[in-house]
Amino acid sequence: LANPLEHCAECVELLGEYIDGSLPKERAEALEAHLSLCPPCITFVRTYKATRNLCRHKLAREMPAELKMSLQLFLARNVPGYRAPDDESGEKN
Amino acid sequence: MLRTLAGLTPTVPCFRVAPLSMADTPTGTAPAQQREQEQEPGQIPDVELVRKAQQGDGAAFAELVTRHQRQLYRLALRMTGSEADAQEVLQEAFLNAYQKLPNFRGEAQFSSWLYRIAANSALMRLRRKRRAPDALTDQPLELQGPRFSAEGYLDPPPRSDWSQRADEKMMDRELGSAIDQAVAGLPDDYRTVFLLKDVDGLSNEEIADALDLTVPAVKSRLHRARLALREKLGEFFGE
């Protein structure tokens, strides 16, 4: 088992990379070991994640169809040979 | 004795208009070839469409537009904060990209190059509007975050786990306003990084390219923004 991080401050500092999955394995294990001993940090992690989820849910925006249309018209006027695709199946999310 | 989280007042300058070299290698990113492999299976790779577009194939350029317009829209919207400005930025960025396409040598990923063009366009627009050329640089920051005791423990510790209640309140209008307000209260570049990453799903590398930041700077801003927002939402939930 990894040695737990000693302080909550260290745990909080590493949280961003931890929940994004980019924290090196050894550090992640040390952080998890700290969490297993520290209920306040567990609560902190849960609410930190909830913050991200709530904001994502409330603030997500899709590109409006009218804007796609006006962009296509603009480019068709200004780019020689521009031909808008028949469908948008190639769109990246 | 209480102290705030170390490094909560960053000294790194905010994002700036990046010098746009057409043979640019983006800051802090994986090599273009490596990232090009992220192409969706079955799709013609960007690099091939670019080659065709460089030879005057308008349909290939249109395909590139279709492929990248949504992410570019999000970037423009997050940076300018306005639907109308985002539309202008998008038009300008794609037209600019078309005109500069002959100079694109494929040393950076096409999407990174495109993001950089759009980000520059958005920043120029912001600066023109504010009539303050350095409005986005070196803002003094004091972001709210958790507090710790001298021994490094959370002090005060979180009073309640509101994450469960957060799920239940997902559709709550007051919560929506609280989030809007909290996000609006973030400094510009922190807000932009947070929205691009956590709401729009861009990668750290894409954000770094677009905003001319290093990946560690993106990660740091993202984390500080999340901590500050968590504090605000905690207040909303009565923590």
Image: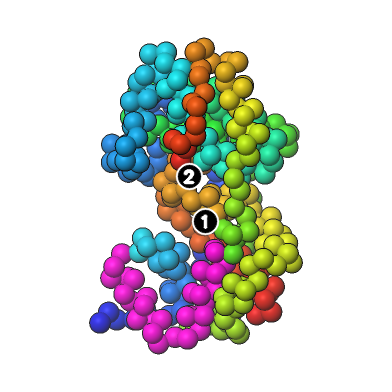
- Percent position of residue A77, x then y: 60, 15
Nearest the viewer among A51 and B119 is: A51
Disc 1 marks which amino acid?
Asp
Q: Using the rendered view, name the quadrant where residue B30 is placed.
A: top left
- Does residue B223 appear in this view? yes
Q: Is residue B60 magenta?
A: no
Residue indicated by mark 2: A93
Nearest the viewer among A77 and A7 is: A77
Question: How many discs mark residues in the rendered view?
Answer: 2
Quarter occupied by the N terminus of chain A: bottom left
Res B198 label: 1
Write the start and end of the magenta stretch as one range.
A24-53
Residue depicted at 62% across the width and 77% down the height: B165
Q: Using the rendered view, name the quadrant where residue B60 is placed.
A: top left
Q: Is residue A1 left or right of residue A12?
A: left
Q: CA distance from mark 2 to mark 1?
A: 14 Å
Same-chain status of marks 2 and 1: no
